[in-house]
Image: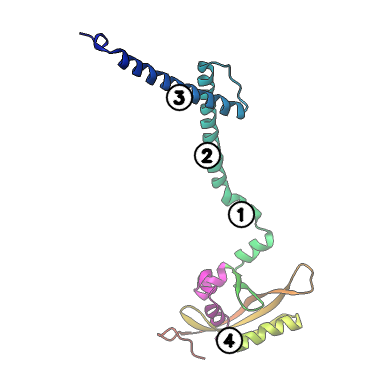
Amino acid sequence: MHVGDTTTPSARAELNMKEKQRMSKMNDTIEHLRKELEAAGVSSKMNKQSILDNTLHYVTMLQNDVVIAKQKSEYALRMAPAMMESSISPLERYFDMSSVPKCIITTDIALVRANQAFLTMSGFTEGALRHPSTLLACLSVDTSRLRTIVRDAMETRQPVRAAVENGFATSLSMNNLVFTAIFDSSGTAVDCIEVVVVASSHQYRQRPPTGHITV
């Protein structure tokens, strides 16, 4: 016996109602798709097949756009190091690649940047030198004298040469440093100070085991 043979009129009516509701919901969804396509500039005929075909085409196009965008992003990431390198000015490149140890500090003695020669000589990373106490001791264990030297370079606007004892990462060393004021774009105000190690006496002694610097 088939199921349809025993279906009551009320059951059939209920099935028909559910089918109508399903079709109505599907029609609403298709109409929503048509409006979304229209808003995106894609026109469709007023039939379900056209709307569904255009929806599939539009989704495929979006997927292709995503793939292209991803490829462009990956290319940009690969090119970024080269672009950054090309954006470095000759003066910056000279500073970074110079064999002469150099660093640039603010007028209140905070690190702006240090070249590789200075980092190698001091034994500190650039991150470590951004700690005020480390930078001060690195430039001179006599921090009050260091502040005086920086002030003199600012006030006289002339290079100031001084023999100082540097508190490097693993040793104390006497070196001759030149502190030179660098002016802002107007050429009137001191923007920062360049510190250059012009000569080393090579008189090294180990830092105390506790890590404290003695003067």
For label 1, the residue is 85
Query: How many angstroms separate mark 4 from mark 2 (CA)?
Result: 53 Å
> Alpha-carbon neighbours of circle 3 within 10 Å: few (<14), some, or many (≥20)?
few
CB of mark 4 within 8 Å of CB of mark 3? Answer: no
Q: Helix, strand, or loop for circle 4?
A: helix
Q: Give how far across and how far down residue 182 sits, in percent.
A: 72, 73
Tell me which segment is drawn in magenta: 116-143
Disc 3 on helix, strand or loop? helix
Query: Element type at marker 2?
Result: helix
Residue 70 tag number: 2
Reading the chain from its start, which is encountered first: label 3 or label 2?
3
Say which amino acid is labelled 4: Thr
| Mark found first going from the N terminus, 4 or 2 | 2
Residue tagged by mark 3? 25
Identify residue type, mark 2. Lys
Residue placed at 66% from the left, 79% from the top?
178
Mark 4 or 2: the one toward you:
2
Residue 166 lies, in percent from the top left, at: 55, 83
109 and 1: which is toward the camera: 1
